[in-house]
Amino acid sequence: MSITVRLPTTLQTSGQDSLTITEPVENIAELVRVLRRQLPGFPAQWDDSMLNFSVNDEVVLHRAEERVLASGDVVEIILALSGGTPVPRSAC
Amino acid sequence: MLPYGLVTIEDRVARLLTELPPNPQFPTQGATLFVDLARRQVRQAYTPRRIIETFLAGRGANMFYLYRLLDESLDPIDPSVPLIFGSGVLTGIVPSAARGNATSWSPESGVLMDSNAGDYFPSFLKMNGIDHLVIYGRADAWTVLWLGDGQVEFRDATPYLGLDNIDMRDRIATDLGGTWTRDLAMANITRAGENQVLTSAIMAGPKACYARGGPGAKMGSLKMKAIVVQGQTHDFETAQPYKQYNKEIATKLLNTSVVKNALRTMGTPFLYRPSRVLGAMGTKNNQETTWTDRLDAENITPYRPGMAGCFRCPVNCRPLNQLNDDQADRYGRGDGPEYVTLGKFGPNVGIDQVEPVIRLNNICNDLGLDTASTGSAIAWAMELYQRGIVSKSDTGGLELTWGDAELVERLLFAMSHREGFGNVLADSTRAIERGHYPTEARKYCMAVKGLMQSDPHDARILKAFALGLAVSTRGMDHLRNRVTLEINARINDDPGFKAKLYGGPVSAQPNNYETKERAVRVCENIYGVGDAVGMCRFTTKLFNSPSLPGLEEFSSQIANVTGLEFDADVLDRIGLNIMGVERLINHRLGVRRSDDTLPDRWFDEEITVGAYKTEKIDRQEFDAMLSRFYAISGLSDEGVPAEAWRQELELVLSGPA
């Protein structure tokens, strides 16, 4: 399993603009759980709902956590046009 | 129709003055000055309480004055059609509330002109005890209106004729003394305004401007070159202490992640990337919808020496730019670009490098051109050239080739001077009516109600965006009602939270038509109130974030500052009322349901890239969505307030019998 995750500047704290996830993840919900552990700054920005995902250059604007991922996918984290509040959800 | 049977603007002003109170109606209220440029007369009164209670100040009360003084049998640039400036109830008092509106009958669109600007001018007006300026009559000679120390003076503007923004600001600061941002503020036109270019702005700072609808042309038609305000900044005497709550608002602003991580660091250009990746970036006059990553905000960073801000705003979201160290290069540095300019002078005209976009931005700021309408007018011409609808014989030999930055630069100066093909571009959406283009050109004009689209986002995917652009009272403009949070998956996927934001369920799918009208209604109300209190759109709840100050915070601070009690529900109704009176004005100007629509291209042509490939606007679905919007807004089938509400509004607007 290898998923490339491209990072926005707000998450490039170690100077890298992408990272590779090798843990098995089936969908974005699982990817988020991995990123929470591996990517400093991600939990705060994710909880603040200012991030969207695109998968292979296609932005996911709803049912995002269900989006299935496969090895070789390129996931990009994109600053949303909005954001700024904790979304009251328990998932992820 | 001549309202109230009064023939002249002087008659109408005289009648209105008999109804207006001579004294402030609440702490911090500023006066309304009626400025007759032709007679060099100034009269003063205050906006009545009933108007404040129905529309507030700023954009809201501006509509009251326009409604009462407009003679729609005239032409927008007739000097008897007033140009009205208004600052909000909280302008200059609350952090990030630095805004004011300029209102009239638009020479560009032919419908309502209502344009909003920040920087320092609206706050300095308010600090000089002025909430509204109602200006009419054509001056005999070009005039600078000077305001300060409670005085109004009509000064000779002859020495400033022909000056664009950079030189005008230098000369005024030298001649009158004072320091910008400390004790000197100005709203001025450039040569474009003098020449009544329909995309000309009234500049309110190095970049900030009243941009939309041709305010510069309107001001130029009155032969007024500038309004200068001088005086020391000071605190206001308010009904109750307000500074502690100001701190809470400032903290809220600065703790909001979109402010902290994006607006304060990159400014609005960060918005380019999500739109282009979505496949919704208007490209080549919206023939395409995605463009190069070379224009992503990160690529502007090397040219950004710092950020600037408006009066007492802690956000500082305005990116400055520096292209080189050559002091002789007039356009080597400046203020901006914002996302709109990046889109309009990048993908929309086929330019794929940041340096020319920054340079064109700096030129527009100097020439005093609305980058939205100007960029769109050029893109429209380029598509007409591409299609053979105009040719070199029409353009004076110019080849209107996509991506030719040097050509675009030449066109900007030609527009400003109304020279050659620039004279065609200077007529913006009116180019067909004025005989420059054949009628088939209309099919490719990306405008609604005569106003070019404000922002570069192609709204064929996001149906709430599309509805908002169609029903906006000033024409095709996202700043009136955009449901920006539609582009946030986390919010879309939380139906409970989303329903709470909009007072009821709104579909999670951004490309679904159902229930989007509810979200547009809520946004239009809160943004209308935001304009009436003077709050920046970027820092108003729902535009960039659900957690920014909204009606509750406005309510608390209005009470502290003015002593007037408006709860959130009342403010929401005021937002609706503002839309209502704007629709009454537009109806007098001939606007009907058929004008609440979108460019043909969005109905007829599909998106061809990205996750939403094949998306377009379905005419039947759109029409049904529009009907639902009218129903929840209390509008008739023709898009004006339904009878009972209309009578209520007219009673308030018409005043004592």
Image (cartoon, grey):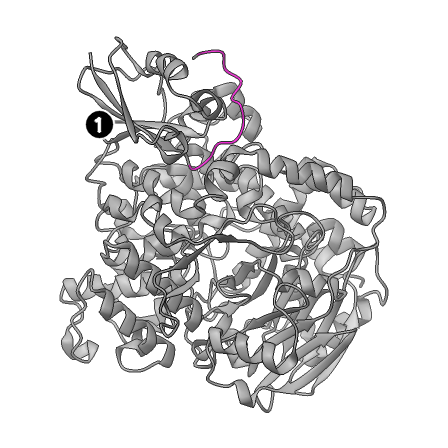
Q: Secondary structure at mark 1?
A: loop
Task: In the rendered view, tell whether residue A26 sits above or below residue B500.
Answer: above
- Identified by mark 1, the residue type is Asn
- Viewer-proximal residue among B211 and A85: A85
Predominant SS of the magenta segment: loop
Task: In the rendered view, tell whether residue B509 sits above or below residue B441.
Answer: above
> Residue at 50% of width from left, 86% of height from top?
B161
Give the class, few, some or many, for how many residues have Cα within 10 Å of label 1's Cα (few <14, many ≥20). Answer: some
Q: Position of residue B581 (x, y in %)?
A: 61, 55
Q: Position of residue B408 (x, y in %)?
A: 27, 68
Q: In this picture, which residue range is highlighted in magenta?
A: A81-91
> Residue at 80% of width from left, 64% of height from top?
B657
Q: Is residue B94 magenta?
A: no
Mark 1, residue position: A56
B469 to the left or right of B55 = left
B540 to the left or right of B51 = left
Q: Which image quadrant for residue B244?
A: top right
Q: Is residue A86 magenta?
A: yes
B311 to the left or right of B188 = right
Q: Position of residue B276 (x, y in %)?
A: 29, 41
- Viewer-proximal residue among B98 and B206: B206
